Image: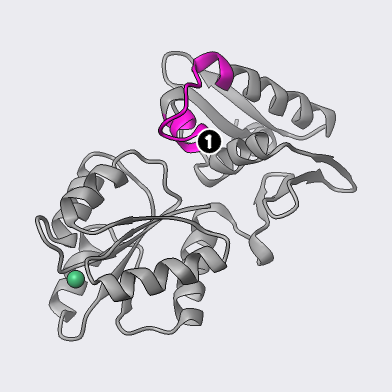
Amino acid sequence: MKVLLVEDERYLAEAVTRILEKNHFDTDLAIDGEEGFIAARSGIYDIILLDIMLPRRDGLAVLRELRAEGVATPVIMLTALGETDDLVKGLDCGADDYLPKPFRTEELMARMRAVLRRRGELLTDGVLSFGDIEYDPNTLILSRGARSFNLTKKEGNLLEYLMMNRGQALSPDAIIEKVWGWDSEAEDNHVQVYISFLRKKLAGLGADSYIKTIRGVGYVLVDGHAQETEE
Ligand code: CA
């Protein structure tokens, strides 16, 4: 899971990065608001930890513009003492939660888990659930009831990205950035190939969930059972 930390206080930024990495979050650090905004708008993060007082652009302005651009990544605001007014504004701007500084490691992890759980139905130990399937990013095992498949790391990362963005179509460009990385030479057809690997495995499990192609936009994970019920 990918985290963007936007924090200008070097000591705190380093400490939080260490905590996150230790808890298996892949962490990128931005040290001012402008850098944070540019990174965040890529949409490749699962969660953003956003300080309010930042050089170049403050956290509230960053959040407001992200939401205005339709970036729905969950955001936890990191607030210093005496920033209560800013905090209320932050929640109004579309923050998912806030955490007053200084905070304890367990507190940060609990807030992140709560926000991620609301978003992607994160079960205990980081297991993700969607419709009738479950995926454990730690073991790379995709399961439905008693049946399961081992995924490759890339398949797993792709599935995790789809599961964390339920109902939202993901473009091949965003998928490449997220799964292969900024500097990769992967192309749209790599994405197609991995989507088809995942489709075969989902079908092999007899899952209701499937990956739908939205022409000209990208891919979205759909819960076929829920859709039938709606229709
Ligand atoms: Ca600051």
Amino acid carrying mark 1 in the image: Val
The residue range painted magenta reads 174-191
Compared across the picture, whether 134 is left or right of 189 comes to right
Q: Which of 118 and 18 is in front in this view?
A: 18
Residue 177 lies in the magenta stretch = yes
> What is the x, y in percent for residue 216?
42, 14
Secondary structure of the residue carrying numbered label 1: helix
Identify the residue shown where x is 55% and y is 68%: 22
Residue 208 percent across, percent down from the top left: 73, 34
Q: Which residue is drawn at 42% across and 20% down?
A: 217
Residue 126: horizontal and vertical position, in percent?
64, 60
Q: Can residue 84 be seen in this view?
A: yes
Rendered position, 122 above or below 101: above
What crowding class fits label 1: few (fewer than 14 Cα within 10 Å), some (14-19), or many (20 or more)? Answer: many
Magenta stretch, main secondary structure class: helix
Residue 195 vs 80, above or below: the answer is: above
The residue nearer to you, when weighing 130 against 189, is: 189
Q: Which color scheme did the rendering employ for the protein?
A: one colour
Quarter of the image where the C terminus is located: top right
Asked whether 5 falls inside the magenta stretch, the response is no
The answer to whether residue 150 is left or right of residue 194 is: right
Q: Name the residue under label 1.
A: 179
Can the viewer see residue 169 in this picture?
Answer: no
Q: In which quarter of the image is ligand 1?
A: bottom left
For image coordinates 13% across by 61% down, the residue present is: 58
Q: How many numbered marks, from 0 up?
A: 1
